[in-house]
């Protein structure tokens, strides 16, 4: 059941991706372990940043949530120093009805609007509430220092060995090119069918 569901979710993930999400820099060689790039949401101190996120789908998915780890430092009340985001859907509020896409959507939402009832960095949470200008300055500086390098997304070509790397920049960050998305999905489905 898990492989069938993962196949279905991955086939639709980049056709209608969550806002600010796109494929990682490396080709997907394992559909249960891949990278997603989250472009910092507009209107947040993370805007302009590119955040590679490691996604691991557990063997008992969908009964256990995916594990997401930010690969760059993020100054945020809900993200610890190892890059793990602590959000209720990764703990007590997980349900098999949630999908990889809804998890990514939730992560972007929490980047924009932290969950202050679940902070793992209490000092940062207090700063967010009581000194918002200081918090924003520190978050922007951390983003500039650790997440300002552009990351190129990898989209496999239709034929083996004919890969396409593409960087998404500017206002087009949250919109993917549909033809490239389809090629990415086709390649992932081929990998899944070989398992």
Image (tube, helix red, strand yellow):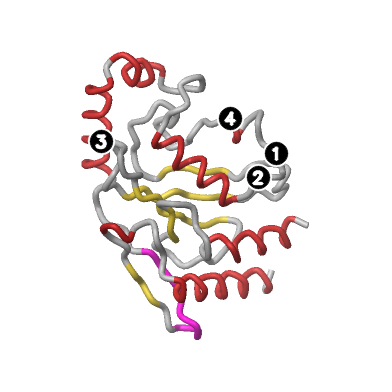
Q: Are marks 1 and 2 in contact (CB under 8 Å)?
A: yes
Marks 4 and 3, the one that precedes in the sequence: 4
Query: What label does residue 142 carry, if any?
Result: 3
Q: Label 2 to label 3, Cα distance in Å?
A: 31 Å
Question: Which residue lies at the image location 66% right of the left edge and 64% below the top edge?
Answer: 7
Q: Are marks 4 and 3 in contact (CB under 8 Å)?
A: no
Residue 154 belongs to magenta span = yes
Start and end of the magenta stretch? 153-161
Query: What label does residue 190 carry, if any?
Result: none
Question: Which residue lies at the image location 40% right of the left edge and 26% below the top edge?
Answer: 77
Query: Circle 1 — which element?
Result: loop
Q: Is residue 126 above or below residue 189?
A: above
Query: What label does residue 95 carry, if any?
Result: 1
Marks 2 and 4, the one that precedes in the sequence: 4
Residue 138: which quarter of the image?
top left
Q: Label 2 to label 4, Cα distance in Å?
A: 12 Å
Marks 1 and 3, the one that precedes in the sequence: 1
Query: Circle 4 — which element?
Result: helix
- At which x and y percent is residue 73? 34, 38
- The residue pinned by badge 4 equals 88
- The C terminus sits in image quarter: bottom right
Query: What label does residue 98 carry, if any?
Result: 2
Question: Which residue lies at the image location 35% right of the left edge and 50% below the top edge?
Answer: 39
Q: Are marks 1 and 3 in contact (CB under 8 Å)?
A: no
Q: Label 1 to label 3, Cα distance in Å?
A: 33 Å
Q: Label 1 to label 2, Cα distance in Å?
A: 6 Å
Residue 103 belongs to magenta span = no
Question: Which residue lies at the image location 41% right of the left edge and 65% below the top edge?
Answer: 176
């Amino acid at each position: 059941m898990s492989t069938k569901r993962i196949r279905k979710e991955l086939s639709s993930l980049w056709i209608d991706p969550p806002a600010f999400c796109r494929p990682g820099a490396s080709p997907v060689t394992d559909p249960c372990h891949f990278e997603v790039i989250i472009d910092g949401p507009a209107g947040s101190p993370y805007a302009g940043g590119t955040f590679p996120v490691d996604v691991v789908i557990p063997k008992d998915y969908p009964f256990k949530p995916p594990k997401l780890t930010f690969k760059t430092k993020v100054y945020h009340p809900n993200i610890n120093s190892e890059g793990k985001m602590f959000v209720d859907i990764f703990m007590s509020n997980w349900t098999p009805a949630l999908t990889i896409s809804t998890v990514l959507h939730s992560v972007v939402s929490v980047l924009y609007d932290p969950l202050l009832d679940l902070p793992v960095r209490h000092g940062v949470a207090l700063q967010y509430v009581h000194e918002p200008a200081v918090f924003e300055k520190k978050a922007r500086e951390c983003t500039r220092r650790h997440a300002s390098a552009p990351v190129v997304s990898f989209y496999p070509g239709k034929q083996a060995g004919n890969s396409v790397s593409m960087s998404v920049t500017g206002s087009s960050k949250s919109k993917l090119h549909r033809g490239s998305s389809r090629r990415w999905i086709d390649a992932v489905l081929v990998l899944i069918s070989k398992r």
